[in-house]
Amino acid sequence: MASAASVALISYSDCCQGFQQYKGRFPIAYESPGALLFPAPSFLSLHQKNHIGCLRATRRPSVVCAIRPKTGTVTQTSWDNLVTKNESPVLVEFYASWCGPCQMVHRVINEIAVEYKGKLKCFTLNTDNDSAMAEEYDIKAVPVVLLFKNGRKHSSVIGTMPKEFYVAAIEKMLAS
Amino acid sequence: MKALQASIAYSFPISSPAASPRRFSRVIRAQADPSDKSMEVMRKFSEQFCRKSDTYFCVDKSVTAVVIKGLADHRDTLGAPLCPCRHYDDKEAEAKQGFWNCPCVPMRERKECHCMLFLTPDNDFAGKEQTITLDEIREVTSNM
Ligand code: SF4
């Protein structure tokens, strides 16, 4: 039920902005052992109904608030500044435009970005637009999540994993 | 990020008044949608292969829909349904080589689909369905 807790953590205003930016895009709840189970807390559903930007979402029963994208985008040009020279630990999610599972992972990373605010910076990189970085880190199957500490790659998570898996890898890096 | 792009494009409605909603959606996405022909071919293929291999679509059908779109896109641009969940140094060469053309070798040999298009029933993400309609695909990907 970790994700239930994370929903509750999002402040009211964060939620509002999320609705506005997403313009009706919604995540779909899926059930898997704990990790991605996303129960809709009632305050969110109420809130949805009052929000113009989110009218679409109210058509579906299992839909919850789309969290404002908390991840930044990184490219080859900004890589040094954002990743290797960043004093904060960094997470980079490599994805491809038409990769379905990448979108699932992206939702998880968005949650993580909220929960680890101030402790971890989260970025995404589109491998279709930025081959150079993908090749440098030898990205083959996507999604791939790389963790960096002090500018150096600490660990990587390849494929679509439950949220706990990413959290465990992050905790391990932060503790190291 | 895609959502952001969308909102930017919304403020510059550059499509002609006669443009259909479909055309408009192309403007928003800044990435051409695959052709209807390819979409239908890949949709049918996915349904058939699902049945043939005793696998199921993901419980989150938007995953299925995005992957089918990706396969259709590669069919249009490369002439072969190259797996959309990988990064390639050279897509053309890869499509010719064939290892990652759907159904890829790992799928055919070991029922491993890291794209989560074909999931064995024991997979946590496997749903109960082996069918997906074009409308479903359009609906779940309309806001991408
Ligand atoms: S992993 Fe293989 S079977 Fe699955 S979509 Fe990609 S090419 Fe097709």
Image: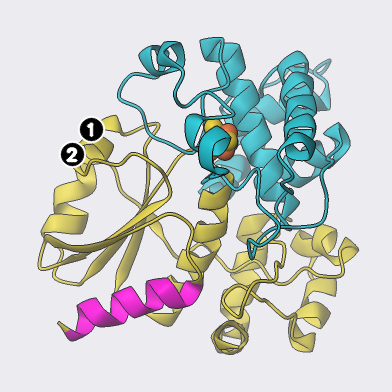
Chain colours: A yellow, B cyan
Give the class, few, some or many, for how many residues have Cα within 10 Å of label 1's Cα (few <14, many ≥20): some
- What residue is shown at x 74% (from left), y 41% (from top)? B142
Asked if the stretch drawn in magenta spans residue A173, the answer is yes
Asked if the stretch drawn in magenta spans residue B125, the answer is no
Q: Position of residue A98 (x, y in %)?
A: 55, 36
Could you tell me if residue A117 is visible in this image?
Answer: no
Q: Quadrant of residue A15?
A: bottom right
- What residue is shown at x 59% (from left), y 46% (from top)? A100
Foreground mark, 2 or 1, reads 2
Name the secondary structure under disc 1: helix
Mark 2 residue's CB less than 8 Å from ligand 1: no
Mark 1 residue's CB less than 8 Å from ligand 1: no
> In the rendered image of this protein, does residue A106 appear above or below residue B26?
below
Front one among A98 and B82: B82
> In the rendered image of this protein, does residue A71 appear above or below residue B27?
below
Name the secondary structure under disc 2: helix
Label 2, label 1: how many angstroms apart (C-alpha)?
6 Å
Residue carrying label 1: A132
Q: Position of residue B62 (x, y in %)?
A: 70, 49
- What residue is shown at x 71% (from left), y 56% (from top)? B60
Could you tell me if residue A171 is visible in this image?
Answer: yes
Q: Magenta region, mostly helix, strand or loop?
A: helix
Left or right: residue A37 versus residue A45 is left
Q: Quadrant of the C terminus of chain B?
A: top right
Q: Position of residue A73 (x, y in %)?
A: 37, 50
- What residue is shown at x 22% (from left), y 64% (from top)? A155
Front one among A21 and B64: B64
Residue type for callout 1: Ala
Left or right: residue A72 versus residue B142 is left
State the extent of the magenta-drawn residues as a range. A163-175
Residue carrying label 2: A136
Q: Quadrant of residue B141?
A: top right
